[in-house]
Image: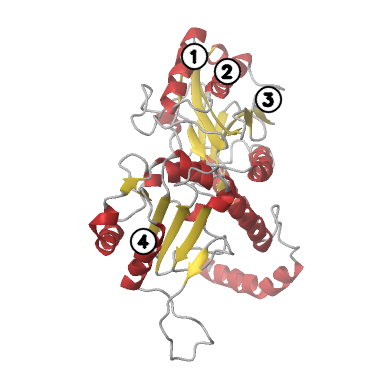
Amino acid sequence: MADFRFARRAVAAVLLVPVLVGAQSAPERPFGTLRDQAVTQQAWLQKRLDTFLPALMRKHGIDLWVVPMREYNEDPVFSSIVAPETMNARRRTIYVFFDKCAAAKSAVAPSCIERIALGGTSQGGVFTARRSMKAVTADVGGRQAELWGDEQWNALKQVIEERKPQVIGIDRSKVFAFSDGLSSGELQGMSEALGAAWSSKFINAEGLPLELIASRLPEEELFYAKMQDRVWQMTKTMFSNTVIVPGKTRASDLVWWWRQRTNDQGLGTWFQPSIEVQRKGVTSEQLGDDPIIQRGDVLHCDVGITVSRLNTDTQHMAYVLLPGETDAPAGLKKALANSNAMQDFAMEEIKPGRSGNDVLRSVLERMKAKGIDGTMYSHPIGMNGHGAGPLIGLWDYQDGVPGRGDAKVTPSMWFSIELQATTPVAEWGGQPVRMAQEEDMIVDAAGRTRWALKRQNTLILVK
């Protein structure tokens, strides 16, 4: 009988779908349509390559940078150098960047850099696309044949022989994934085609793709502030009685509320959100993996959104008020103040030219001087959630991160200031409470630091 009732309800729901769809309001698009976003992204692409690439090639001593890749095995730099309509490499695509002013040591300028695509398209006019000379006999609407196989390597060799570079940068690195996009097969094919004379000029570009991926424009900073505002709005709604019913709502309900709300607004995300609960007199093992939220709980979220290839990463804290309470206990507020102090240390220590390990060391020294027990594990952010650039600690590497922590902070780089402070709370009988915070910040073109929007300095209160 129960099965029959369920089937009858399901049929009724199907019959109602056309009516419900017709009654729906227009979808919410806080950042405009995909077409709107693509126009903006294309302008960013052109300006990023004009603004950052010439100086970076000169800085790293590379007069020709070659970036070959095959479809579905794209170089990590791919999304930083192609149009928003381009999802994957086309068959094989070889992007070539040549600094024609380097030999004469002329001043760096956008006009110095030739951008050539061997395969694929011009990416909205950003590259000069070279096509095959092969005749096509089939009726394909006037389309020209594409470069294929050895023809591509031969075209690359011709480009190189015409320009005679002294140094050829390739994306190969044992340290940075962002700089290690050249697959072994592509390296072998390219080396065989170019021969020993040109292959001997290969050097690992390493810092060039790393810094190009990390570099952000002022226009992107403005857009990013809107993304941060959206994250704050969503977090405050999630940590409210609109979503939480103490005694009924589970942590996983908030996780899936975030995922669904993100999807409903046409936004993406780069990781599964998480919700953690701390409770007076109860261990994390006793709470279990998916506790029901109760009054008096401390809540923590780790959430992010993706828009126009940019990513956010945020951790905020909330407190569920007990009956009769109008504010969080003083001990919890003090615990949050300790993590705020760590944020201040990081913001003051992050400066262009310093390595991630240098920044970590300075922050930990200041924490020790203030008697703060915590860990610092911050990372760059932007085109990738865990972005290109220096790591400032890892949660399990508080004595520095060899290699990845040795990279330097550069202007126009963004960071997620991620950390935690653990503080005994008197109102909880001295029980340690962990305040884990994460807020995105900007190092601007002049090397000044600021929050992308703002940072949390008061607990969100769930009534």
Label 3 is placed on what type of residue? Answer: Pro
Task: Using a 10 Å C-alpha cutoff, classify the residue at mark 1 as few (fewer than 14 neighbours), some (14 to 19) or many (20 or more).
Answer: many
Badge 1 or badge 2: first in the primary sequence: 2
Q: CA distance from mark 1 to mark 2?
A: 8 Å
Q: CA distance from mark 4 to mark 1?
A: 56 Å
Label 4 is placed on what type of residue? Answer: Glu
Residue under numbered circle 1? 367
Which numbered disc, 1 or 3, marks the residue closer to the eye? 1
Task: Using a 10 Å C-alpha cutoff, classify the residue at mark 3 as few (fewer than 14 neighbours), some (14 to 19) or many (20 or more).
Answer: few
Nearest the viewer among 293 and 231 is: 231
Q: Is residue 342 above or below residue 48?
A: above
Give the image location of residue 106, x and y in percent.
52, 44
Nearest the viewer among 461 and 224 is: 224
Q: Is residue 424 above or below residue 175?
A: above
Contact? badges 2 and 4 (CB < 8 Å): no
Residue under numbered circle 3? 323
SS for tag 2?
A: helix
Badge 1 or badge 3: first in the primary sequence: 3
Contact? badges 1 and 2 (CB < 8 Å): yes
Residue lying furthest front:
104
Badge 4 or badge 1: first in the primary sequence: 4
Task: Using a 10 Å C-alpha cutoff, classify the residue at mark 4 as few (fewer than 14 neighbours), some (14 to 19) or many (20 or more).
Answer: few
Task: Using a 10 Å C-alpha cutoff, classify the residue at mark 2 as few (fewer than 14 neighbours), some (14 to 19) or many (20 or more).
Answer: some
Residue under numbered circle 2? 341
SS for tag 4?
A: helix
Picture disc at residue 394: none
Which numbered disc, 2 or 4, marks the residue closer to the eye? 4
Label 2 is placed on what type of residue? Answer: Ala
Residue under numbered circle 4? 161
Q: Is residue 397 above or below residue 121?
A: above
Side of 89 relative to 198 (left or right): right
